[in-house]
């Protein structure tokens, strides 16, 4: 087994891993969990306006 054969096997393994990741990412079974993860930054509750006003007035007084 020479270095060319080892490199060929390594290339094939990496290619199969790449195809596996692509199929996993575009699987219709994963769509709902990916959609949920995409909306996580928007899931935080907004602060009431009165609390924001108090915080900003405190920082202005210092």
Image: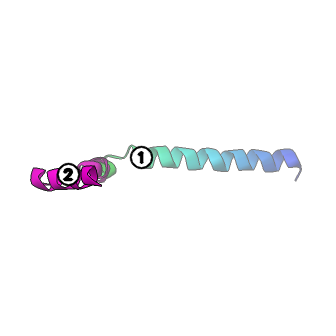
Residue nearest the observer in this picture, 39 or 27: 39
**Magenta segment boundaries in residue numbering:** 33-62
Q: Residue at x 84, y 44 (%)?
A: 4
Closer to the observer: label 2 or label 1?
2
Quadrant of the image occupied by residue 55: bottom left
- Is disc 2 surrounded by few (<14), some (14 to 19) or many (20+) residues within 10 Å? few
Magenta stretch holds residue 1: no
In this view, the residue in front, 1 or 47, is 47
Residue 44 appearing in the image: no
- Check disc 1 and report the residue beneath it: 25
Query: Which residue bears the numbered disc 2?
Result: 57
Quarter of the figure that contains the C terminus: bottom left
Judge left or right: residue 51 versus residue 13: left
Q: Is residue 35 left or right of residue 54?
A: right
> Magenta part mainly helix, strand or loop?
helix
SS class, disc 1: helix
Please provide percent x and percent y for residue 32. 26, 50
Residue at 41%, 46% (x, y): give it: 25
Can residue 60 be seen in the rendering of this structure?
yes
């Amino acid at each position: 087994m020479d270095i060319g054969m080892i490199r060929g096997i390594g290339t094939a393994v990496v290619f199969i891993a790449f195809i596996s990741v692509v199929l996993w990412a575009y699987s219709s079974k994963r769509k709902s969990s990916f959609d949920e993860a995409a909306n996580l930054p928007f899931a935080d509750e907004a602060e009431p306006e009165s609390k924001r006003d108090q915080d900003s007035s405190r920082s202005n007084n210092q």
